[in-house]
Image (cartoon, grey):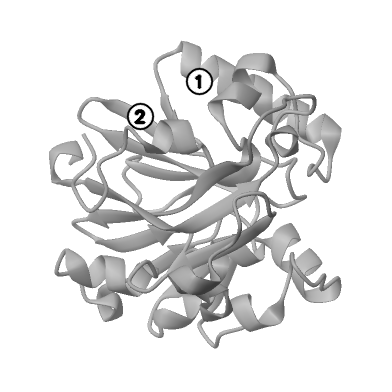
Amino acid sequence: MTDDLRLYAFNCGWFQCRPGYFVEGDEGDYLRGPVPSYLIDHPKGRALFDTGMGVRYCRDLETALPANKFGLQWFEGMDIATRLRAIDVDPESIDWIVNSHLHIDHCGGNVHFSRATVIVQAREYEVARERPDPGLYEAVDFDTGQPIRTIEGELDLFGDGSVRIVPTYGHTHGHQSMIVRLARGDVLLAGDCCYTERNLDTMVLPKATADLEEGRLTFERLARARAAGTRILFGHDGRQWATIRENARFE
């Protein structure tokens, strides 16, 4: 089964911030991190892990963010639907959207996938609906008409152990990640449970953590997984992303 499973990585925009936003105390120039989305192509169906940002964050070069400004942006052709078409994948063929959480830069592309079912932790969906927060939780991004499947804890998406959704609480109260079993070993799609590899190396949680105790436990689990050989793809790590081959099968 593993040989028939394919993983593709796409960057759907940029997250720009001061260096201390990720690891408090860091200094230097502003950082540009990716806003990733991943396609999991399985014999039983196709799933996306996160979908990037909504159209309101699209810019052109003339209105791009200055190099010293916090914000989100993507440019024409970087939305996830266009990224998929570039590798001859029809957005209508997506069966599942697995949102790590419902912040604006992780579910803004959900609207492109009318026949997909969205999978999210029940506690995440509850917070997003009951406590909207401009710039974080906005219904225009996640209330897009698809069926919503809320889960509690882990889910074996295809029933064969090859794609597992796992809770990684901390950044939000209902954050989840995904573990994909490839021929060369497990890959953990972190979402924002850990922004960058430097966060994990230093075991420093960013200030943007809703539950510090849960976040600490998640970091400990990530550290154990990495030590055991799991490759982790971090949420907004520009240095790591420079090593990723986009629009190509992940090996």
Work out whether residue 177 or residue 68 is closer to the camera in this orientation and state it.
68
Identified by mark 1, the residue type is Ala
**CB atoms at circles 1 and 2 under 8 Å apart?**
yes
Q: Give SS at disc 1.
A: helix
Q: Could you classify mark 1 by the number of other residues whose Cα lies within 10 Å: few (under 14), some (14-19), or many (20 or more)?
A: some
Q: Is residue 209 above or below residue 67?
A: above
Image location (x, y in percent) of residue 67 = 60, 50
Image location (x, y in percent) of residue 50 = 48, 59
Q: Residue at x 20, y 46 (%)?
A: 5
Of the numbered discs 1 and 2, the one sitting upstream in the chain is 2
Q: CA distance from mark 1 to mark 2?
A: 9 Å
Left-right relation of 41 to 132: left
Q: Give SS at disc 2.
A: strand
Q: Could you classify mark 2 by the number of other residues whose Cα lies within 10 Å: few (under 14), some (14-19), or many (20 or more)?
A: some
Where on the picture, by quarter, is residue 21? Answer: top right
Image location (x, y in percent) of residue 71 = 66, 59
Q: Residue at x 70, y 67 (%)?
A: 125
Circle number at residue 186: 2
Circle number at residue 201: none
Q: Is residue 30 above or below residue 103?
A: above
Identified by mark 2, the residue type is Asp
Name the residue beneath numbered marker 1.
225
